[in-house]
């Protein structure tokens, strides 16, 4: 991609026509001010040019454009592989961009440009058109803070991914490590959350303690399994149970009868023992003891009474003996019946003890199932935690393997990496022959997100201008790697703000030499005083060829018509607005 022109639909706008090689937009200021003083508003339009390039190619919506310059349309023309393209975008309807006559959403345009300029269709989430293209056109003030600060608030991972891609360094290893690290952090966070989540623990463990209750549950399950394995289900269990109850009742009744009969027999036997003959003499002795004189007539009557009583006792004793024999026979019958019922009861109890009802069997199986479920939940809880622990160990092992693979990759590609180091070193040495400098590319091993450590170094980084030189050297290295079809670099005047005249002169010499041997473009905005600062260091003809002949536009602040837009409007160029994702 090379730029052809930047135009607008307003006559006041100063169109920008880009040439091959160096393209300088000079800012002349009647009332000079420090452009790097934190002022984020456009002065004459130098910085605006870079923002408009991004704007036409689908940058985030710029709200200031809608408010300050409504009804403006900007058109950027460019060439890729000898084919010309254009992008037209309106400040009123920034959600749509016309690309060679086709109306596209910004994200769709990004996909097309990724394919055209980088040959990419599917890219990692942190590698987008915006992150890649911004490495060729630094537009924000924050982009000039460090060598790898191209996009505001860009993550370290995105920096490594995009920079390594443009340097021609393998990105698969970068993405793999990021994915592994994300999985590792996710597994660790999930494991920690599981352990602390009360609802999760309640579902799987209830009131159990996984470590203490597992053995107890296994023991109880073993006993139940044994009981169930020995359990015999009786189809008529309840009938036999009822019969056993009836037999028990009958036995108790018989035992009660036996007691009654036994008592009756005892009473009969006692009655027999107490019965004795009533003698006449005894009766007389009774009367005599009472000092009663018994006449003969009465004595004669007593004899008769005694005789009658003897006969009566004899009859009673006969009857008692018969009753005694009868009751003893009854007692034998009761005993025999008790023995018979006892035998039946023993049979029933033995059967009932070795068998059970279906309901009892079902109850046991339900109890067993509940215990097994309880144990299974403990096992599942332990397995879940183990799975996360195993995952972390697997990831750790994979990280170690990737560390080895990265070391191998760096060794196998050391020649190419040395070429990158040499190019950066050569650029830096042109600026600072006596300062140590170099591009450091190392394997960043360990449990972290970044696959590589990438540093662009120049000794005394804190010195004025060194940071800007380092930025330029790194940007120029990215362009010369030619991983993409983008063939230009664009810098704002901030790039030159802290450089001393000698560094500015060296920069333009490097750019001029390279552009003469390639079809690259170097586009920059710079203040007039910065250009004049090194004019005396070049010969007149040399300064003319490198600088004066390559000035494509001069802007100044003496009159609104002399500014890029041709009107006096202050636009907040640091307004990032909404992302293009919001305009899909």
Image (tube, helix red, strand yellow):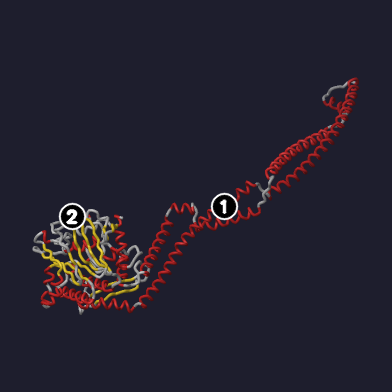
Q: Is residue 256 above or below residue 224?
A: above
User: Is residue 284 found left or right of 349 in the rendered image?
Assistant: right
Q: Which of these two is toward me, 303 or 319?
A: 319
Q: Residue at x 51, y 55 (%)?
A: 377
- What numbered label is drawn on residue 69? 2
Q: Residue at x 27, y 71 (%)?
A: 478
Tell me if I can see residue 142 in this picture. Answer: no
Q: How many numbered marks, from 0 up?
A: 2
Place of residue 442 in the rendered image (x, y in percent of width and height, measured from the top left): 33, 74
User: Is residue 531 found left or right of 577 in the rendered image?
Assistant: left
- The kind of secondary structure element at disc 1 is helix
User: Is residue 345 found left or right of 401 in the rendered image?
Assistant: right
Residue position marked by numbered label 1 in the rendering: 369
Judge the density around disc 2: few (<14), some (14-19), many (≥20) Cα neighbours within 10 Å.
some
Task: Name the mark nearer the viewer: 2 or 1.
Answer: 2
Q: Which of these two is toward me, 555 or 388?
A: 555
Place of residue 1 in the rendered image (x, y in percent of width and height, measured from the top left): 26, 68
Based on the displayed image, in which of its 4 quarters is residue 160 positioned?
bottom left
Place of residue 2 in the rendered image (x, y in percent of width and height, measured from the top left): 24, 68
Q: Is residue 288 above or below residue 107?
A: above
């Amino acid at each position: 991609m090379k730029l052809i022109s930047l135009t607008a639909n307003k006559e006041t706008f100063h169109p920008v026509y880009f040439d091959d090689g160096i393209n300088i937009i000079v800012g002349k200021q009647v009332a000079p001010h420090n452009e790097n003083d934190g002022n984020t508003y456009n002065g004459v339009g130098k910085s605006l040019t870079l923002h408009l390039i991004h704007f036409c190619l689908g940058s985030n919506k710029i709200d200031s454009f809608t408010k300050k310059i409504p009804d403006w349309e900007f058109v950027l023309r460019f060439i890729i592989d000898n084919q010309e393209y254009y992008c037209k975008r309106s400040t009123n309807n920034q959600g749509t961009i016309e690309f060679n006559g086709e109306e596209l959403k910004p994200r769709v345009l990004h996909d097309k440009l990724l394919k055209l300029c980088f040959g990419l269709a599917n890219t990692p989430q942190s590698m987008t058109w915006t992150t890649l293209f911004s490495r060729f056109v630094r537009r924000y003030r924050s982009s000039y803070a460090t060598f790898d600060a191209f996009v505001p608030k860009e993550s370290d991972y995105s920096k490594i991914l995009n920079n390594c891609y443009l340097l021609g360094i393998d990105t698969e290893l970068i993405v793999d490590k990021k994915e592994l690290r994300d999985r590792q952090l996710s597994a660790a966070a999930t494991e920690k959350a599981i352990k602390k989540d009360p609802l999760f623990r309640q579902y799987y463990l209830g009131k159990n303690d996984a470590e203490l209750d597992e053995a107890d549950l296994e023991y109880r399950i073993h006993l139940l399994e044994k009981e169930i394995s020995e359990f015999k289900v009786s189809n008529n269990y309840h009938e036999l149970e009822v019969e056993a109850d009836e037999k028990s009742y009958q036995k108790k009744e018989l035992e009660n009868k036996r007691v009654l009969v036994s008592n009756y027999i005892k009473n009969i036997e006692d009655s027999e023992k107490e019965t004795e003959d009533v003698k006449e003499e005894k009766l007389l002795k009774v009367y005599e003891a009472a000092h009663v004189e018994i006449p003969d007539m009465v004595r004669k009557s007593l004899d008769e009474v005694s005789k009658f009583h003897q006969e009566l006792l004899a009859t009673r004793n006969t009857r008692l003996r018969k009753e005694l024999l009868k009751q003893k026979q009854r007692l034998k019958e009761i005993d025999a019946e008790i023995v018979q019922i006892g035998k039946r009861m023993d049979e029933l109890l033995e059967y009932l003890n070795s068998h059970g009802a279906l309901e009892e069997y079902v109850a046991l199986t339900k109890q067993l199932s509940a215990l097994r479920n309880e144990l299974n939940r403990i096992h599942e809880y332990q397995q879940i935690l183990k799975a996360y622990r195993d995952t972390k160990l697997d990831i750790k092992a994979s990280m170690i393997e990737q560390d080895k693979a990265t070391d191998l990759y760096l060794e196998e590609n050391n020649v190419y990496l040395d070429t990158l180091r040499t190019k950066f070193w050569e650029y830096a040495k042109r600026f600072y022959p006596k300062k140590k400098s170099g591009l450091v590319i190392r394997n960043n091993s360990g449990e972290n997100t970044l696959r590589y450590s990438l540093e662009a170094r120049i000794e005394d980084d804190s010195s004025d201008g060194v940071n800007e030189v380092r930025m330029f050297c790194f940007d120029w290295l990215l362009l010369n790697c030619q991983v993409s079809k983008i063939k230009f670099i664009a810098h704002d005047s901030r790039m030159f703000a802290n450089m001393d005249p000698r560094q500015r002169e060296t920069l333009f010499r490097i750019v001029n030499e390279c552009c003469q041997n390639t079809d690259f473009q170097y586009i920059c905005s710079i203040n007039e005083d910065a250009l004049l600062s090194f004019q005396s260091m070049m010969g007149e003809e040399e300064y003319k060829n490198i600088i004066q002949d390559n000035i494509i536009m001069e802007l100044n602040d003496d009159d609104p018509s002399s500014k890029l837009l041709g009107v006096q409007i202050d636009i907040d160029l640091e307004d990032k607005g909404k992302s293009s994702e919001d305009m899909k």
